[in-house]
């Protein structure tokens, strides 16, 4: 059976879900954060090795100050509640993004989760926080320019360009799922998504369950991945 190594998810639809329940948008984010635990456990159970979640994009600062500051508090709420469980389950957390622009306390909590779990060998759970693919590409180009000053013979190749990315520890994405019914990539992992299968599901992130994840993986297994080649 075709195995699935890396799933990336755009966790969209929290706000609309909350509104439909007569609640404020941030209530959707809180239920969304709870669902990070549910889906990480489910993905691990289903044999996924890498799960990468889009929690906050470089464009999300345009939201109301109230909403942004609520999302920035979620990592502390989340890891206080679940860090021990995640460690026990062997999850290895990685935080991806331009972390220096985050509030100090948010950054600290996130880096602590990464540090505490770095020896773990189980599910590699990456959380993208203040991440944007175009900005990441510019950062990589600047990092290369700097490395070139130190080593004028350093060539830029497909392999070593990857090393300059914020996402250098991520393998290629096999399946990208976006919840909430919109069909866009929204600046998410352009390098790693190059040959990913894409799925757009109607369920909003708070409604996205193990069952829906399983269905996506089943569908993925019937896709014919050709990586630009030909397969009969
Ligand atoms: C997009 O939905 C969702 C976000 C910008 C926030 C996602 C954050 C979480 C699910 C919590 C992350 C958890 C941790 C532990 C960091 P939206 O609100 O834009 O949906 P809408 O399209 O309905 O408005």
Image: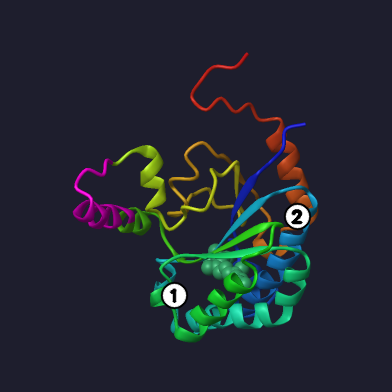
Where residue 48 appears, as percent x and y from the top left, is 71, 48
- The answer to if 150 sits in the magenta stretch is yes
- The answer to if 142 sits in the magenta stretch is yes
State the SS at label 1: loop
How far apart are labels 1 and 2 at the CA level?
A: 32 Å
Q: Which residue is mark 1?
A: 63
Ligand 1 image position (quadrant)? bottom right
Say the numbered circle drawn on residue 44: 2
Magenta span: 140-155
Kindly tell me whether mark 1's CB lies below 8 Å from ligand 1: yes
Where residue 119 appears, as percent x and y from the top left, is 65, 64
Regarding residue 6, the answer to whether it shows in the image is: yes
Are there few (<14), some (14-19), or many (20+) residues within 10 Å of tag 1? few
State the SS at label 2: helix
Which residue does the image show at 56% across and 44% down from the upper left? 173
Are there few (<14), some (14-19), or many (20+) residues within 10 Å of tag 2? some
Where residue 37 appears, as percent x and y from the top left, is 72, 67
Regarding residue 20, the answer to whether it shows in the image is: no
The quarter of the image holding the C terminus is: top right
In this rendering, position of residue 16 left or right of residue 97: right
Which residue does the image show at 47% across and 54% down from the upper left? 188
The quarter of the image holding the N terminus is: top right
Disc number lying in front (1 or 2): 2
Where residue 183 appears, as percent x and y from the top left, is 53, 48
């Amino acid at each position: 059976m075709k195995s699935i190594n890396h799933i990336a998810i755009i966790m969209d639809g929290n706000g609309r879900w909350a509104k439909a329940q007569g609640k404020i948008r941030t209530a959707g984010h809180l239920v969304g954060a709870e669902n990070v635990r549910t889906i990480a456990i489910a993905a691990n159970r289903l044999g996924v090795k890498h799960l990468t979640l889009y929690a906050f994009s470089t464009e999300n600062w345009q939201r109301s100050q109230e909403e942004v500051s609520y999302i920035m508090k979620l990592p502390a709420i989340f890891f206080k509640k679940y860090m021990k469980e995640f460690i026990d389950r062997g999850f290895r957390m990685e935080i991806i993004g331009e972390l220096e622009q985050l509030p100090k306390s948010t950054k600290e909590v996130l880096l602590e989760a990464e540090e505490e779990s770095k020896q773990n060998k189980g599910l590699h759970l990456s959380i993208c926080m203040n991440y944007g693919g175009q900005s990441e590409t510019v950062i990589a180009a600047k990092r290369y320019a700097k490395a070139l000053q130190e080593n004028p013979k350093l060539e830029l190749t497909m392999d070593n360009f990857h090393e300059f990315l914020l996402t250098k520890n991520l393998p290629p994405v096999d399946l990208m799922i976006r919840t909430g019914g919109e069909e866009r990539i929204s600046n998410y992992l352009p390098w790693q998504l190059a040959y990913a299968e894409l799925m757009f599901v109607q369920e909003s992130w708070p409604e996205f369950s193990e069952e829906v994840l399983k269905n996506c993986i089943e569908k993925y297994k019937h896709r014919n991945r050709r990586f630009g080649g030909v397969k009969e």
